[in-house]
Image (spheres, rainbow, N blue to C red):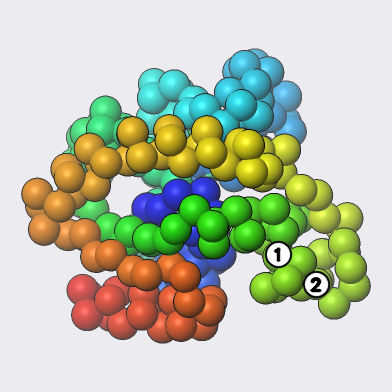
């Protein structure tokens, strides 16, 4: 967990690679659905562009379908989900049916000024999903994905104005989710203002300690 720009996407990529986990990113799945012109894509794009959350029912349905794929058998990382208390409660029901549970929740904490700096420099590869930053994680050739050669884009919700909306929305919705997991004793808070390597080292030792 963590607000937009806290490094959830970057850390998720590193975690799934290092621990060989399936990556369940609801943001990526929604962006793919919009690209594939799914019937709910138009309304979803509008909400995402406004920095608002997509309805719980839709998100839960997408996650449930994703969890039916075989690659989750050896464990998975949920990135950007659950974002509301009803999502967290439904997630537990879905997992229970599969004989699984949430083992660990990592909460990335960071202040607004640092977030604004990060978010306006973020660039995304629309083709393979890699995330870059013009200052902190630049590509070898400006504007071109190192991984697949596609032209990078800036997400339409990566502006300071949208950051304010998304942060408010995040705080309002995420606080009860964190409390829900705090009550289970599985939350670990990580200071997300360091370098990518520092943050990942801390996360790595937390996950290794929880295994
Ligand atoms: P992300 O890529 O995780 O930052 O998500 C981008 C946008 O997708 C969010 O601002 C929401 O509009 C939508 N979204 C992603 N995950 C969820 C979720 N679990 N619940 C509701 N909306 C979501």
Residue 36 horizontal side relative to residue 6, left or right: right
Where is residue 168? Give x, y as percent.
43, 35
Q: Earlier in the sequence, mark 1 or mark 2?
A: 1
Residue closest to the eye, 182 or 98: 182
- Residue position marked by numbered label 2 in the rendering: 139
Q: Are marks 1 and 2 in contact (CB under 8 Å)?
A: yes
Point out which mark residue 57 bears. none
Cα distance between the residues tagged 1 and 2: 7 Å
Q: Is the CB of the residue bearing disc 1 within 8 angstroms of ligand 1?
A: no
* Identity of the residue drawn at 82% across and 55% down: 152
Which quadrant does the C terminus fall into? bottom left
Q: Is the CB of the residue bearing disc 2 within 8 angstroms of ligand 1?
A: no
* Identity of the residue drawn at 80% across and 72% down: 139
Where is residue 12? Give x, y as percent.
49, 63
* Identity of the residue drawn at 29% across and 74% down: 207
Specify few, some or many for label 2: CA neighbours under 10 Å numbering under 14, 14-19, or 20 or more. Answer: some
Secondary structure beneath disc 1? Answer: strand
Secondary structure beneath disc 2? Answer: loop
Residue 102 horizontal side relative to residue 34, left or right: left
Specify few, some or many for label 1: CA neighbours under 10 Å numbering under 14, 14-19, or 20 or more. Answer: many
Point out which mark residue 132 bears. 1
Where is residue 161? Give x, y as percent.
63, 37
């Amino acid at each position: 967990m963590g607000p937009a720009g806290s490094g959830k996407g970057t850390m998720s990529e590193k975690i799934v690679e290092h621990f060989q986990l399936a990556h369940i990113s609801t943001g990526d799945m929604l962006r793919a659905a919009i690209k594939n012109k799914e019937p709910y894509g138009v309304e979803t794009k509008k909400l995402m562009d406004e920095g608002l959350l997509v309805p719980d029912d839709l998100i839960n349905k997408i996650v449930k379908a994703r969890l039916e794929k075989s690659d989750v058998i050896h464990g998975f990382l949920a990135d950007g989900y659950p974002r509301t208390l009803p999502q967290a409660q439904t997630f537990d029901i879905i997992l229970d049916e599969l004989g699984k549970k949430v083992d660990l929740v990592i909460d990335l904490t960071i202040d607004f000024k640092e977030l604004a700096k990060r978010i306006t420099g973020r660039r995304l590869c629309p083709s393979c999903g890699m995330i870059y930053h013009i200052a902190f994680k630049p590509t070898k050739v400006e504007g071109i994905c190192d991984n697949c050669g596609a032209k990078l884009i800036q997400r339409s919700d990566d502006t300071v104005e949208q950051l304010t909306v998304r942060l408010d929305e995040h705080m309002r919705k995420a606080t009860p989710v964190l409390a829900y997991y705090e009550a289970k004793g599985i939350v670990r808070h990580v200071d997300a203002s360091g370098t990518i390597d520092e943050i990942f080292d801390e996360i790595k030792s937390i996950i290794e300690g929880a295994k």
